[in-house]
Image (tube, grey):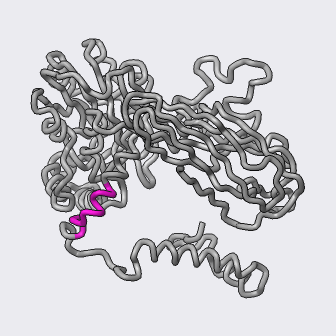
């Protein structure tokens, strides 16, 4: 970590004295400062150090808009699809249900202008528990916890959002424009917190006559008590809000095709969604380009290509859960005996790290290493052929992992070392090469020194942390110190 926030817990006077006295190598500090300066130069902060006071002008940059849209498109992760997506058939009536489909606020997280304005209104409107006339009200969504509601301020928040992001529109409006031959009907139905059912009847009535139901699911990410996730907003349940879990099961009884799109700062984890929905699209907080990106994926104008950057547990009782656990721990803890870690749940995650579906299929082959014997500090190349074996264009994220099966210090069962996004037309093949250094295998030994240790390193290649069909080994012939403190991998798509 090169930068600490305004409270100097670690980067304090004591650390300053350690550099001044020579106890710590000043080169470490120089490297950290250089990385910070390089980041600021790339961001253009030296040319434009202050934010624009004209918000509408600041967000009119066409290059920035294109980048925002691309970020949204590439971040969407298709978690489930029984074949309903892309939406190829014509629908007479599409029911769109959920808070997040009727507002753009749910597409933005904390520390955005929308979130901070919302927090200011909440603070001034409920100071000392007295309604200051802001229109914000408190609601007991959970025992002992009040979540502030902005219902009376909804139009003001939406107006502010459209002022800052004039091209951003709610999901149901984007769907109306994308499916002009269909009747697209919206109902809020359920909220982003609590177990309230006041909107169920209207929403279920709309769903009864629909050919397709799209459920906008999730909590609300932001700052303070108007949100269910964000800084200092915690919960013990990692599932969907109770009202949403119940509505999914009630709507499933109608036997309608249902697609779930999920918004939040954390991934979806829901038994009801897994069991009842025909498709699940993880949308995160897609920002200004969110609606356009989601509609493009649902219609099949682009194929989803995002991969999960986290491991998703089935419930809080499984936590902590991460893919890079040590040998003999987590869901591999009982491999020797072949039994389960839980009597009432699978021990594996709901969705593994690196997972994500596509509208096409891919195959990896011809996994090769440039040299099998290496010394500490050597460079080498790993390559693989990627083929689009489906009938439409798509992008696969090729992932390269390694493990050190026998080390002097216990190591993770696998670690991601490189990845590459590979766009391919139907039937197209491309060769992907990763240029690497043995420094990436370094770990801290018992003397607290970075070390590249001799022995076998197993390389694994695939499309997620749990789908790694290709393997190879390299052998480090002698111990050594890494040359670089930061080990980066470079991918080359041929």
Q: Nearer the viewer, residue 110 or 289?
A: 289
Residue located at (88% from left, 57% from top):
479
Classify 231 as above or below 294: below
Residue located at (76% from left, 37% from top):
327
Residue 134 makes an appearance in the image: no
Position of 373 compared to 171: left or right?
A: right
Classify 186 as above or below 477: above
Position of 282 compared to 168: left or right?
A: right
Residue 435 image position (x, y, % from top left): 65, 55
Which SS type dominates the magenta stretch?
A: helix
Classify 91 as above or below 23: above
Q: Which of 331 and 360 is in front in this view?
A: 360
Q: Nearer the viewer, residue 232 or 419?
A: 419
Snapshot quadrant of residue 202:
top left
Residue 135 image position (x, y, % from top left): 16, 52
Residue located at (32% from left, 39% from top):
302
Number of numbered discs overlaid on the protein picture = 0
**406 falls in the magenta region:** no
Segment tinted magenta in the rendering: 58-68
Position of 116 compared to 439: left or right?
A: left
């Amino acid at each position: 970590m090169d930068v600490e926030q305004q409270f100097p817990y670690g980067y304090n006077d004591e650390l300053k004295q350690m550099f001044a006295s020579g106890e710590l190598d000043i080169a470490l500090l120089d490297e950290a400062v250089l990385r910070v300066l390089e980041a600021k130069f790339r961001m253009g902060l030296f040319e434009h150090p202050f934010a624009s006071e004209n918000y509408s002008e600041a967000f009119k940059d066409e290059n920035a808009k294109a980048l925002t849209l691309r970020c949204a498109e590439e971040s969407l992760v298709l978690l489930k699809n029984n074949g309903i997506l892309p939406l190829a058939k014509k629908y007479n009536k599409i029911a769109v249900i959920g808070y997040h489909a009727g507002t753009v606020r749910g597409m933005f997280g904390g520390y955005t202008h929308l979130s901070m304005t919302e927090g200011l209104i909440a603070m001034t409107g409920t100071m000392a528990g007295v309604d200051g006339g802001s229109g914000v009200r408190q609601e007991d969504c959970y025992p002992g916890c009040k979540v502030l509601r902005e219902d009376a301020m909804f139009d003001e928040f939406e107006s502010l959002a459209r002022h800052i992001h004039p091209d951003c529109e709610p999901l149901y409006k984007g769907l109306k424009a994308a499916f002009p031959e269909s009747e697209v009907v919206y109902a809020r139905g359920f909220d982003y917190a609590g177990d309230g059912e006041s909107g169920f009847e209207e929403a279920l009535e709309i769903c009864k006559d629909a050919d397709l139901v799209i459920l906008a699911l999730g909590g609300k990410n932001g700052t303070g008590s108007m949100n269910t996730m964000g800084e200092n907003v915690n919960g013990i349940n990692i599932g969907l809000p109770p009202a949403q879990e119940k509505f999914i099961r009630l709507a499933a009884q109608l036997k309608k095709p249902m697609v779930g799109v999920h918004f939040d700062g954390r991934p979806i984890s829901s038994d009801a969604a897994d069991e009842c929905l025909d498709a699940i699209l993880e949308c995160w907080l897609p920002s200004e380009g969110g609606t356009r990106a989601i509609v493009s994926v649902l219609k099949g104008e682009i194929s989803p290509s995002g991969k999960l950057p986290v491991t998703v547990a089935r419930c809080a009782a499984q936590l902590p859960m991460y893919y890079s656990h040590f040998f003999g721990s987590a869901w591999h803890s009982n491999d020797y005996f072949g039994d389960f870690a839980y009597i009432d749940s699978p021990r594996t995650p709901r969705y593994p790290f690196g997972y994500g579906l596509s509208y096409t299929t891919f195959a990896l082959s011809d996994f090769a290493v440039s040299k099998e014997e290496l010394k500490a500090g050597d460079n080498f190349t790993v390559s693989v052929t990627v083929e689009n074996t489906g009938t439409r264009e798509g992008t696969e994220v090729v992932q390269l992992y390694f493990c050190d099966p026998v080390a002097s210090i216990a190591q993770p069962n696998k670690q991601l070392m490189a990845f590459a996004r590979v766009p391919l037309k139907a039937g197209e093949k491309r060769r992907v090469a990763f240029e690497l250094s043995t420094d990436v295998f370094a770990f801290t030994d018992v003397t607290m020194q970075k070390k590249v240790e001799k022995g076998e390193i197993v390389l694994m290649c695939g499309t997620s942390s749990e789908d790694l069909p290709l393997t190879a080994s390299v052998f480090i012939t002698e111990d050594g110190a890494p040359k670089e403190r930061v080990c980066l991998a470079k991918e080359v798509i041929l």
